[in-house]
Image (tube, helix red, strand yellow):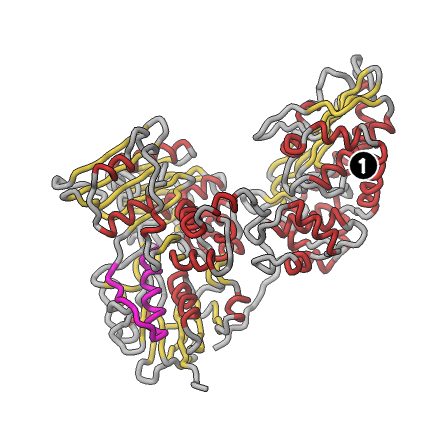
Amino acid sequence: MTEKQKLVVIGNGMAGMNAIEQLLKLTDRYEIIVIGAEPHPNYNRIMLSYVLEGSKSIDDIIINNREWYASAGIQLITGCKAVRLDTTLQQVIMEDGSATAYDRVLIATGSNPFILPVPGSTLEGVIGFRSIEDCDSMMEAAKQYKKAAVIGGGLLGLEAAKGLVQLGMEVTVVHLPDYLMERQLDVPSAKMLQQELERQGLKFALGKQTTALTGSTRVTGLTFADGTSLEADLVVMSVGIRPNIDIAMGSDIQVNRGIVVDDYMQTSVPGVYAVGECTEHRGICYGLVAPLFEQGAVLAKTLAGVETAPYEGSIVSTKLKVSGVDVFSTGTFLEEPHHDIIRLHDGWNRTYKKIVLHDRVVVGAVLFGNIDDSSRLERLVKKGEQMTEELYQELTGSGGCCGGKAKSNMAAELVDDDIVCGCNGVTKKMIVDAIQIDGLTTLDAVKMKTGASRSCGGCKPMVEQLLQHVLGESFQSTQTKQGICGCTSMSRDEIVTAIKEQNLHTIAEVTQALAWSQSEGCSKCRPALNYYLGMMWPETYEDERASRFVNERMNANIQKDGTYTVVPRMYGGMTTPEDLKKIADVSIKYKASLVKMTGGQRIGIIGIQKEDLPKVWEELEMPSGYAYAKALRTVKTCVGSTYCRFGTQDSLGIGDLIERKFERVDMPAKFKFAVNGCPRNCAESCTKDIGIVGNDGGWEIYVGGNGGIKARLADLLCKVKTDDELMEMISATMQYYRETANYLERTSEWIERIGLEQVQNTIVHDAEQRQQLTARMEIALSKLEDPWKKMVGDQKLRNALFEKVIVTEKVAH
């Protein structure tokens, strides 16, 4: 057996690890060691803005977790910096003086944020935006300070600014040119982007040159060359990047602006390669992802000994989603006198298209708002295609920016190595192989397997075209059957039936028995399976806390600043003076930022630190209000016959009874009640999942209301005379909804899907089925306990979830 060569990778970023992923598919000739200066495994730096704004966690943007490295046989060293190469002894020298031998080494150190060399740039509160740690610093600053300035109107700067706005800060983007994203957009599209971002709350100071940052220890503002100034207690520098060439400079490897490489990514030293933002190829340093993945494909084949065409440079294309707005550019998009321009600007739909021609050849393009033609235009530019009358009609047509004749399937024109997903380096061949070899038939399945469209989503149309191209006529029929996620093609009903028939009792059993494409499941299906299993087997199923959403895991509502809101239960909107005093005392003691009356007649204590949650619950001595849960949230009531001169029924008593009975049972989605003591509707029963209206003859029960995004008035289910009949009817309705709704499907959608008549036939007109449903609900209710009380009494779980723990990681050398 041939002894493996030792390949040491310096840098654990996207470019280097993408090259290694491709290498592993070609050969196993290497023993691989990866050295990363950051303490994290490989993550998607493009997605940092989502972490900053709070829509994703750090775990959500990890590309390769530690288990992946282990399963691939890769030794991962994190939190440790390599400082130079001893190219004579063939060793990588670490910051602590230790050394690691290599046969070949790959430098993939990326780039560093450029910090303007102006007075005050070293003040506290001045940071870059390049890493998870930068996100953490910005989120911490947003908790204490209100005014931020972001210097740099490029993509990262705008994403940082939008994230800070989401965190509640007043943000001004400072940019030297007089329009945004000048490297990706022309003036008209940049102005459209600015208008959209201003609608989202951003402010702009364009054409401003920062000459100094003011402040003694912490930054307090900026001064500009024109004599004006701006207040700011957080300044984010996002004015560009510089290749990180430190290790090459200390190792006698040729550098210019970046580490100089040839067409096979070889540096000036034999056996030493480089890839990514740290490199300079034919005088160009690339800062976008797609060219770096193209470099990685050539490098992987070179290291594997597979014949490959040389890397000859990239035609740069940018396909981005900036704060929810799609933008695209490719090739030469800033026109000059010798260019012919096709320009379509639709101010009403906020779309813009510009195609740049030189001697009838398509040399560049810009799209804003609608980027359906992006893949096609990118291909036209790369191939140097001429504009024809037919092509002109297809790209413009009678519909302006978004119109035109039906477009051909561009997937057929792509070659195998063309990158479809620039965010994750997914080529056409990788997607086609996943469809043909793994039998994938849906966009979600391809996304799960390859990562294509997993990040910004801009490549989704091309992935769908590839599905259509490969599957042919069967494509449409495969789309009619959607699984609950990309791990499976099975529907909700098929899964629940299989769980029952095959007697499956854990998530692992379900994913294995039903042949999930991803054996562990994903963030979309695991919470659904956790609910379905708990609903099916209430007496025996052990809840998998890790498969719940973050609010349910923590038993409180996480806010965008990282603190939590605690909402104690107030049955029917009622409480006691003693409980009110507890709420006030706890709010003061634990420095709540706000105490708010909720729309469900409760009190929210906002701004509690995570580590204080168990102490708050313990001192309140009140049950959880489940404001975070897919369960009964509130029972809103009027004062009814007890106090109101118009009241005909005891709405307070019934509201209290309903809330105490059903307060902890898991539901497919959040669930709200309202009880009115008369038809005047003071408690707004008509927009609740179940609304109850009292009258002289008893109660009316309404179902399927929603006052949210998809507003819907509830339908009359039935009328009953007694309180006992009322409780039986709503119990059966809730259980029927639990057993037949899709996970996360509100009753407003559920009632429209299955029909009011079906619900009435099952519950109102079939006494036997109603009693069976009620009995199953009683079994589910019998196994419930208050989560706050349980957490307070479980010290091990309390420590794991809420205590601050300092972890010292041992680093292998």
Residue 270: image quadrant is bottom left
753 relative position to 179: left or right = right
Which of these two is toward me, 320 or 94? Answer: 320
63 relative position to 312: left or right = right
Residue 549 in sight here: yes
Please provide percent x and percent y for residue 354: 25, 37
Magenta span includes 302: yes
How many neighbours does mark 1 have within 10 angstroms: few (below 14), some (14-19), or many (20 or more)? some
Q: Which residue is mark 1?
A: 660
Q: Which residues are magenta?
A: 289-313
Picture residue at 51% right of the left edge, 57% below the top? 439
Residue 144 in sight here: no
Assign the magenta stretch its main secondary structure.
Answer: helix
783 relative position to 309: left or right = right
89 relative position to 754: left or right = left
Residue type at mark 1 is: Arg
